[in-house]
Amino acid sequence: MASKARVNIGVIGTGRIGKLHAGHIASRVSGAALVAVADINLAAAQATAAQFHVPVAVADYRGLLDDPAIDAVVIASATDTHAEIAQQTAAAGKHIFCEKPIDFDLRRIDATLAAVQKAGVKFQVGFNRRFDPNFRRVREMAAAGKLGAPHLLRITSRDPAPPPLEYVKVSGGIFLDMTIHDFDMARYLMGGEVTEVYAAGAVLVDPAIGEAGDLDTAVTTLRFDTGAIGTIDNSRRAVYGYDQRVEVFGPGGVVAVSNNTPDTHVYSDAEGVHSARPLYFFLERYTESYIAELQAFVACLRDDTPPPVTGLDGRIPVVMGLAAQKSYRENRPVRLDEIKA
Amino acid sequence: MASKARVNIGVIGTGRIGKLHAGHIASRVSGAALVAVADINLAAAQATAAQFHVPVAVADYRGLLDDPAIDAVVIASATDTHAEIAQQTAAAGKHIFCEKPIDFDLRRIDATLAAVQKAGVKFQVGFNRRFDPNFRRVREMAAAGKLGAPHLLRITSRDPAPPPLEYVKVSGGIFLDMTIHDFDMARYLMGGEVTEVYAAGAVLVDPAIGEAGDLDTAVTTLRFDTGAIGTIDNSRRAVYGYDQRVEVFGPGGVVAVSNNTPDTHVYSDAEGVHSARPLYFFLERYTESYIAELQAFVACLRDDTPPPVTGLDGRIPVVMGLAAQKSYRENRPVRLDEIKA
Amino acid sequence: MASKARVNIGVIGTGRIGKLHAGHIASRVSGAALVAVADINLAAAQATAAQFHVPVAVADYRGLLDDPAIDAVVIASATDTHAEIAQQTAAAGKHIFCEKPIDFDLRRIDATLAAVQKAGVKFQVGFNRRFDPNFRRVREMAAAGKLGAPHLLRITSRDPAPPPLEYVKVSGGIFLDMTIHDFDMARYLMGGEVTEVYAAGAVLVDPAIGEAGDLDTAVTTLRFDTGAIGTIDNSRRAVYGYDQRVEVFGPGGVVAVSNNTPDTHVYSDAEGVHSARPLYFFLERYTESYIAELQAFVACLRDDTPPPVTGLDGRIPVVMGLAAQKSYRENRPVRLDEIKA
Amino acid sequence: MASKARVNIGVIGTGRIGKLHAGHIASRVSGAALVAVADINLAAAQATAAQFHVPVAVADYRGLLDDPAIDAVVIASATDTHAEIAQQTAAAGKHIFCEKPIDFDLRRIDATLAAVQKAGVKFQVGFNRRFDPNFRRVREMAAAGKLGAPHLLRITSRDPAPPPLEYVKVSGGIFLDMTIHDFDMARYLMGGEVTEVYAAGAVLVDPAIGEAGDLDTAVTTLRFDTGAIGTIDNSRRAVYGYDQRVEVFGPGGVVAVSNNTPDTHVYSDAEGVHSARPLYFFLERYTESYIAELQAFVACLRDDTPPPVTGLDGRIPVVMGLAAQKSYRENRPVRLDEIKA
């Protein structure tokens, strides 16, 4: 790749996140070109293609895999199609950027990672929050030893509003759909592996979520191989907006990051002192990190370096999610090595 | 009491906390007078008496119980003497302000509460943090319905430095010595009862603490009867000072309080933006709340109202601490009703 | 004085500020005793005496000057009586703590300072804000060279509500009544002298203040002998409470202090993020600094050291105030050396 | 214009700011295309053209004015060429986005505005800070009446480092080069006109700036036609980075905005509590506002609405700058109506 002037990318799946990636590749990611889009809903593919002036729009993603002009694909289709598409893409010799989660099933994940390895293509998983300046700064300070070996991790991760019930039903559940980002963040920030989880959950936001078999509130305790302890608290509805904070504490100090806001205004009146709410949701909050993760993907293709988020990085949070599910069901701490493919 | 101009108080135990209370009664608590002090170390009692111009200093606290001029006593002696002294004080018909914990043994606690009830005296437990303006504000906002029925509670409670090892050995362990304040805070803020705890602990600060049979780092998950979930994280050593924060989250919003600092300065230089560390430890941080709890005690005597922190409020955090100990030992969630007197 | 166990203090004038000082001396200032109070309104003197258990209450302050048991007096009477009382007190050989301003007339100030010098008594002026931890921290950082030689000073000083019109009429005007504190703060923080002022003023809060011949809004530019430039902005009414901030900027960095609040709560709801207003007014905001200035006064008597706020420190802000008045009237910068006694 | 799919823009001047605009038009401003660049240094024009894949690069800007495919030009050449180029552009019937200042000479400004009016083209001045979310929020809150009629305005505007001396010499001086942005901001935020200014200045950062006939530190007091008073403090060197804060105070409250930072991290260690410095300088701080001002320019062309920053908005801050210069030289307040074209 290093000799190529430009990486040609196709996007598979033009739902919300696929369209987002398509737009970024088209105009914000340097050294890349959006050359094709695919969606089983052809009209959706065509609309996205029109919006970003892309010549190729197809219903069958295999059209992209057959196209020699395409260097890499972004897989942003429904989760249950990731594994199969990724395996075929690998077989076609094209590099892969795959949205999280790779799959809910460890065997299918392992088959995917094996296919990738066999084909020798690059495979990056879409844990975009690793590319956020706040979290990156925490990671850098931890990695630089400013905290010493961490003792405690706290993650607060709350959505402004629950997804539609139809989505909840196929989401894999809160731990695999929502907490999975925090599981990845925990590994990223702590530079260590989780050995055991204990998950407490509740349905407090909306009974319909419980009726759909899911939780909307959860607190997960993480035990790390270093002895450190972490907690993640999740809610599907924070009325004040998207709440995305982390804190890492160690013998050298503590570093915390708070929410981003649209502006820094502080207004004081007879009632109190008032400032802006956090940015509403992930599209507003993580815009730049979505661009940065694709920029990093393009860089690893051009420089032939390992992707910054590997297939294993995609697998482990799924194991953590499965362990959290089991912990919640059995109301006991569950070791990660209890979860087998 | 209502007709009395002044409440005469004796202090039993003139260690650090007893001396603190003595000084406050002598000069900062209105409507009260410090009239006697007792300490098994007579010289210590005499020194405190001299410092605060108190006429009576004795080695045997029973001297105070026999003194008809004394209306109430503050019990600030060693924890294992609280129950016996309290029972004798009740029998002597004097009101009691008892430092936390009442005892580590539930049967002795229950005997004490029974003695108090039989005697008809007032009994207040020294959970001073309830009188801190920060936590009080959280409680008031929660009680006023600004959050809705709470979903999540987060307490961060970290000491600047571990106590001496000699103290650690007789402290009852981190859950009964340190987390007990946070257990009380959890009940105070949430207005509900905890039904189950899960405690993860570690020795990360100082191996000697582990050798003494204790932990120095702990994360406790609380399940409330309302369905809400809480976490408490503790460390015995935060290099940046005493870290005392809470956050309550509900459907109506979230309220959080941060640390108090000696001043509000913000200094920006070529390296960054710098501000003051939190106040060092509980003596600096909670000065005013120690005064306020005694003022409230005096008020309940003068107005013949119930004490703001009752004997039951003193008992329940001990149950929570015993459950946390058991949870840590057995690495499983423990219901509070598993803990029997 | 150094040999005395206790400094006996009488308070002259038992209005709001005199009563405040009396209470502090009675119970919060160590090494001092409140032994007498005087007020031309005898009933007021007696009420204050009763409140603080003081044996002596007189209408004529000369009763205090004749009392050999009294070491020092606090002069908190009406401003136009300060000079005469201070001169008589000095003649009686007693030390003086004098509320600001010493007087509005420079000749009377100079006569007072001469009398003090002749008598060899201590004389401290009540610029209490110098004893506030925030401002003290700024001063210490500036003095320690953390900023380099300062270039810019910004002071924001706004009251929550204007004083009664009756007070406005005898107050000496906004520059001598309100800004005078900021003039002192400017000298204290910058460690240099002001050579010229330019005052812009307006009546924007209440036309009645303008009808009484005063301003309610003012911005004063200060030129320092070091070349540094400062600004002070004042308003008689900030609906959000007492606004007391300063900022000093130099080649090494900038240090700023913000307002103090009753608690640290931050509440986020669907409307925004909300926190506490500043403490309401000077009694709430500067409680501790009023105690600290008297403690420092007692210390300088006991240790025979110079008072921390001298007579000259009391004189110069009056010169600045007179220059600001002249600047406003003539709408031009006025040098301090234009103001003659 | 409303019927056109795309606004074709040429950029004249490819120095730092011209290149910035060129890049934004090429990829970040929707509905616009960068079709040509001009620079008297042809190589510079060609380099910019190559970077952004622009077909046309010329040395003589008149090449752009003759090109019928070009709808509008961005004038980002040296300040002393703005007026002439703008007048020729207007004569050529093309719309104009002109960097600030239009000119230092009021007669040339007036000739330019007359030419624009005669030609009936749109003319927008590059006061980009009006498009910053922070300042925009302050303006919106003021305009919405949240503050009442403003009483006080405070602007802090400090650069991280002085420009090169060669630039200083042709910059027009601090008031016309640096404070001019703050003069515009004052009008924008207060919704009123300034009638008089008083400027205090100093050379405290670098004597060489003084030797070049300029100041590096300045405090300007503004009197508004509403009676409100404002101050602007400027420094050419803040070691902690670009300091861009404003505050508007009125009877209804106060609103302030603080600096933007690269991340929200807060690090506490044994020394204190530390966070990120402000973004370094205007390129980092105002990136989005540079895009937004061009987006607004394109919108006013497409919708045929008035530009959001008019020629008069470009003229008045120059008058203010000239008045500030005169005020500094004569050390007296100067009314704006003293400044004649």
Image (cartoon, coloured by chain):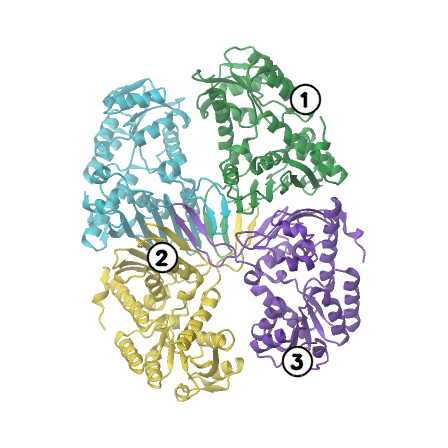
Chain colours: A purple, B green, C cyan, D yellow
Identify which residue, C336 or D93, lies in the foreground.
D93
Identify which residue, C147 or D100, lies in the foreground.
D100
Task: List x then y, in percent, for residue B149.
Answer: 57, 42
Tag 1's secondary structure? helix
User: Mark 3 and mark 1: span between their CA atoms?
Assistant: 80 Å
- Which mark lies nearer to you, 3 or 1? 1
Task: List x then y, in percent, for residue C243.
Answer: 37, 45
Residue at point 66%, 22% (across, down): B110
Q: Which mark is residue A4?
A: 3
User: Mark 3 and mark 2: span between their CA atoms?
Assistant: 53 Å
- Whether residue B241 is visible here, answered yes or no, is no
Q: Amino acid at mark 1?
A: Arg
Q: Which residue is mark 1?
A: B108
Q: Amino acid at mark 3?
A: Lys
On-image quarter of the C terminus of chain D: bottom left
Tag 2's secondary structure? helix
Residue at point 59%, 51% (across, down): A255
Q: Amino acid at mark 2?
A: Ala
Dot 1 crowding, Cα within 10 Å, few <14, some 14–19, many 20+: some
Dot 2 crowding, Cα within 10 Å, few <14, some 14–19, many 20+: many
Q: Image height check: is C88 above or below B120?
A: below
- Whether residue C190 is visible here, answered yes or no, is yes
- Which mark lies nearer to you, 3 or 2? 2
Q: Which residue is mark 2?
A: D142
Residue at point 21%, 30% (across, down): C84
- Whether residue D81 sits left or right of residue D287 in the image: it is left
Q: Chain of mark 1?
A: B
Task: List x then y, in percent, for residue B127.
Answer: 57, 30
- Whether residue A194 sits left or right of residue D331 in the image: it is right
Q: Chain of mark 2?
A: D
User: Mark 1 and mark 2: span between their CA atoms?
Assistant: 64 Å
